[in-house]
Amino acid sequence: MKHLAIVSFPANAETLATLKDALKSALPDTRAFDGCRSVDTYIEQSTNTIHLIEDWETLEHQQKYLEWRVQTGLLDMLDPLLSGGAANLKVTICGPQNTDI
């Protein structure tokens, strides 16, 4: 991995399936976005949280992608599907792999 970002989408139990469908539709565009190397998905069943493990060429690519998603309204569309709304979406920017530990 070059630059790791983890995005967590906490769903309500009754909206998890709809959130999965929405992300299934959205992720092809994410994977095709300039600088995206890969996106893997995981579901934390105990909390109904979908985690995206994203690998980006640079953190600037990831930032441009996030800005594009805000501009195109994806967060507004996902808001009612998330536990606590889009304000509870969590983005963790880890950056490059640390190989000296």
Image (spheres, grey):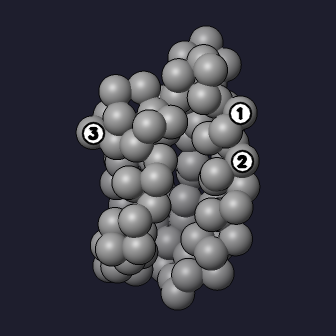
Above-or-below relation of 51 to 45: below
Q: Is 95 placed left or right of 74 in the picture?
A: left
Amino acid, disc 1: Ala
- Extreme residue toward the bottom, this view: 34
Classify 10 Å Cα crowding around label 2: few (below 14), some (14-19), many (20 and above). Answer: few
Classify 10 Å Cα crowding around label 1: few (below 14), some (14-19), many (20 and above). Answer: some
- Picture coordinates of residue 71, whole percent (x, y): 33, 74
Measure the C-alpha gap from mark 1 to mark 2: 6 Å
- Picture coordinates of residue 49, whole percent (x, y): 55, 29
3 or 2: tag closer to the N-terminus: 2
Q: Is 95 placed left or right of 27 in the picture?
A: left
Q: Write down the quadrant of residue 101 in the picture.
A: top left
- Of the numbered discs in the image, which one, if any, rests on residue 81? none
3 or 1: tag closer to the N-terminus: 1
Residue situated in front as seen by the camera: 44 or 58: 44
Q: Residue at x 55, y 59 (%)?
A: 54
The residue identified by callout 2 is 21
Measure the C-alpha gap from mark 3 to mark 2: 20 Å
Find out whether the residues at labels 3 and 1 contact each other: C-beta distance under 8 Å.
Answer: no
Measure the C-alpha gap from mark 3 to mark 1: 20 Å
Q: Residue at x 47, y 47 (%)?
A: 78
Query: Is disc 3 placed on a helix, strand or loop?
Result: helix
Q: Residue at x 56, y 76 (%)?
A: 36
Residue situated in front as seen by the camera: 75 or 47: 75
Above-or-below relation of 11 to 46: below
Q: Residue at x 72, y 47 (%)?
A: 21
Residue situated in front as seen by the camera: 8 or 1: 8
- Of the numbered discs in the image, which one, if any, rests on residue 87? 3
Q: Write down the quadrant of residue 64 in the picture.
A: bottom left
Amino acid, disc 2: Asp
Number of marks in picture: 3
The residue identified by callout 1 is 17
